[in-house]
Amino acid sequence: MEKIRVSTKMVGIILCVLTLLAVVGAEFTWLTLPAQAEEAWPPINWTHIHFNARIVGHRLIVAGSGFPHRRDVVVRARRYDGSSWYSIATLKTSRRGKFSADLPLPHFLEIANSLQVCVKDKSSGRLTCVIARRY
């Protein structure tokens, strides 16, 4: 059997390559982890959330602030008598956690004088509701 000679320089190169592979492998392990809900940092103070909605003609005007920044929120509405919920739109909050929109109402909700309108943060599931009145 032959002896394999390895120089000190070769050992150093092998150790560097193995270290590099370990670091790169550790950096990409997040690709295989299951997705989890994003936690905002700093933590969101849900008491500072403001949301309002009003009915003007055949449109629903919504505005909100204090929400997590750059997140999708779903706007849903139903008649105040407790009928089925209808998804009106999906909006994205600004980098300051604000949104506003002038949305068309579905035909069956246009005639209502008041609606229960909720906005739901898609990532956290947090729901905020108000009563929208006709102006």
Image (tube, grey):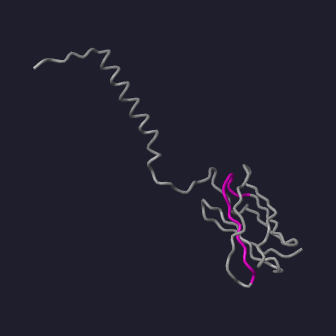
Q: Nearer the viewer, residue 88 or 61?
A: 88
Is residue 11 within the magenta segment? no
- At x 68% / y 59%, what residue is drawn? 45
The residue lying at 33 percent from left, 23 percent from top is 14
Q: Quadrant of the N terminus?
A: top left
Instruction: Count the labels in the image.
Output: 0
Image: magenta residue range? 66-80
Q: Can you say which quadrant of the picture contains the C terminus?
A: bottom right
Residue 68 in magenta stretch = yes
Q: Residue 41, how many percent across, how many down?
A: 62, 50
Q: Is residue 10 left or right of residue 41?
A: left
Above or below — where is 125 with respect to 38? below
* Residue at the outermost bottom position: 81
Q: Pinpoint residue 96: horizontal percent, then vertical percent.
A: 74, 51
Identity of the residue drawn at 72% across and 68% down: 88
> Measured along the vertical axis of the image, is residue 127 above or below residue 69?
below
Above or below, 62 against 22 in this view is below
Answer with left or right where residue 44 lies relative to residue 18.
right
Residue at 68% from the left image edge and 52% from the top image edge: 70
